Amino acid sequence: MILAVCFDLHENKIETIEITTFKDSSIKEIPKNKYIVKEIDEEQVEFLDFGFKLCIIQELMYCKKLISPKFDLFEFVIWYTQRDIDLEKEGYDPTLSPTFCE
C-alpha cells in the first residue's frame, strides 16, 4: 500500500491524500521506454538533500502534474526486468532501494 499526500504550502493544509494498493490485473501493456531516463539539454539541478528532492518531485509530478509520465511504483515493478523487486521485503526501507540509473 502506498500513501501519497499533497500539501498546499500557501494555505498550510493538506490538499489531497491518495492510498493505492497493488492490482496486477489492472495494469495493461506498459510501453518499453516509459521509465527510461532521457538526456536533457538544459541546466541540471543537483539536490544535496534526498528527502527535499523527493518533496519537489512529489509536488511537481503528482500535485501539479508538471512532470510526466507519472511514476507508478506497482507498474514499475512489473516493467523493470533486470531483477525481481519484492515490495514487501524492500519497498519500505530506503537503504535497500537499488539505484536504477547510472
Image: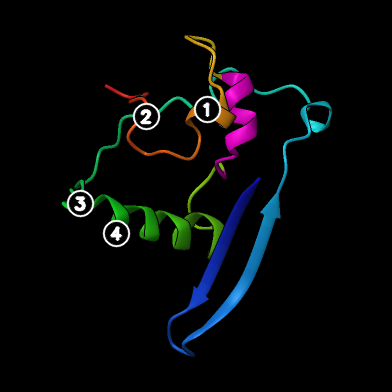
Question: What is the CA distance from the residue labelled 4 to the residue labelled 1?
Answer: 25 Å
Give the camera-side residue of 75 and 1: 1
Instruction: Specify the label residue 47 is tagged with.
Output: 3
Judged by depth in the image, the label closer to the viewer, 1 or 3, is 1
Q: Are marks 4 and 3 in contact (CB under 8 Å)?
A: yes
In terms of sequence position, does the residue under pointer 2 or pointer 4 come before the other? Answer: 4
Q: Quadrant of the N terminus?
A: top right
Question: What is the CA distance from the residue labelled 1 to the residue labelled 2?
Answer: 9 Å
Q: How many marks?
A: 4
Question: What is the CA distance from the residue labelled 1 to the residue labelled 3?
Answer: 28 Å
Q: In this picture, is 82 found above or below 19?
A: above
Q: Is residue 78 magenta?
A: yes
- Identify the image quadrant of residue 99: top left
- The amino acid on which the numbered mark 2 sits, given as a three-letter code, is Leu
Residue 94 location (% of width, % of height)? 37, 39
Q: In this picture, is 82 found above or below 49?
A: above
Judge left or right: residue 101 versus residue 65. Answer: left
Residue that carries the numbered disc 1 in the rendered image: 89
Residue 89 location (% of width, % of height)? 52, 27
In terms of sequence position, does the residue under pointer 3 or pointer 2 come before the other? Answer: 3
Q: In this picture, is 69 found above or below 10?
A: above
Q: Is residue 71 magenta?
A: yes
Q: Are marks 1 and 2 in contact (CB under 8 Å)?
A: yes
In terms of sequence position, does the residue under pointer 4 or pointer 3 come before the other? Answer: 3
Residue that carries the numbered disc 4 in the rendered image: 52
